[in-house]
Amino acid sequence: MQVTILGSGTNIHPTRAAAGYLFQTDRPILLDFGPRTLSNLLKTGVDRHTIQHLIFTHYHADHFSDFLTFFFDAVCHSKFAHVRPALNIYGPPGTKRLFRTIFRTFPNFRDAPFRVILKEVNDQPFSIGGTLVAPLPMTHSDQQVCLGYRLEYQGRSAAFSGDAMVSPNLVSLCQDVDVAILDCSFSSHAPGGSHMHAEECGKVAKKANIKKLVLSHFYETADRSNVVAQARRFFSGPVVKGKDLLTLQVGKASQVV
């Protein structure tokens, strides 16, 4: 299992794309699709027209908006070049209503020459090829369900919190994983609402007994602090500050590329 961070920042960040992660097992899986992540996806060398599985944690714009450009590009490519394979979109309750509204409203979206399959998930595991994907609701927004996801493939495991605050579900999601990518929006010196700060990430990592902690989803205030040192106050294992296009090999050594 390999994961590449396409975006480690938030909606408008001067140096980082917003949330997006490319997991590669026996097939590519895209998890969240925030602004500027599509440009970083192109830099990975993965053919965007072969990606058949998009998973969304929730639909705040910083986790979603590049889907619109991606889909319009897919429609144009399929009409004038080769029809792409079916596109599977997974997300929390409300996914079908949102995407059906988008497909009805945006020009040319209704007439996509490939199949689009919408799947709403909540807390039941599902499989994508040989990868087991286990979603769990996180604590983030009163307006919508936000899911975290755990991916397991050939004895390797990774967890992604999405936007989250500390909760029993988050600890359960991350229990004993090889790599956990956690929402570290804030410095411990300047915490904010609806997200975690670095010390909280360290506490979750310790309680869940993860193998490697990756901090991501930074607001500018977090970037101005030593969030790695703050997380290490509570977690003695490896801590990595995420950055765009950082690739991690998820396994016994959890190597960084």
Image (tube, helix red, strand yellow):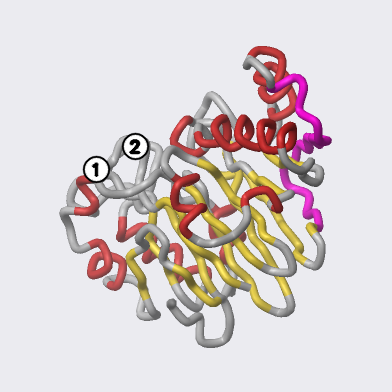
- Quadrant of residue 77 in the image? top right
**Residue 193: numbered disc:** 2
**Which image quarter is the N terminus in?**
bottom right
Looking at the magenta stretch, what is its main secondary structure?
Answer: loop
How crowded pointer 1 is (Cα within 10 Å; few <14, some 14-19, many 20+) is rated as: few
Q: Residue at x 72, y 72 (%)?
A: 153
Label 2: how many residues lie within 10 Å, few (<14), some (14-19) or many (20+)?
Answer: few
**Side (left or right) of 71 relative to 63:** right
Q: Nearer the viewer, residue 55 or 93?
A: 55
SS type, badge 1: loop
Residue lying at 64% horizontally and 15% vertically, measured from the top left:
107
CA distance for labels 2 and 1? 21 Å
- Circle 1: residue type: Pro
Q: Nearer the viewer, residue 230 or 218?
A: 218
* Quarter placement of the C terminus: bottom left
Outermost residue, bottom direction? 253
Where does residue 113 sit, x and y in percent of width and height? 80, 31
Residue range (magenta):
109-127
* Up-down relation of residue 123 to residue 92 (above or below): below
Residue type at mark 2? Gly
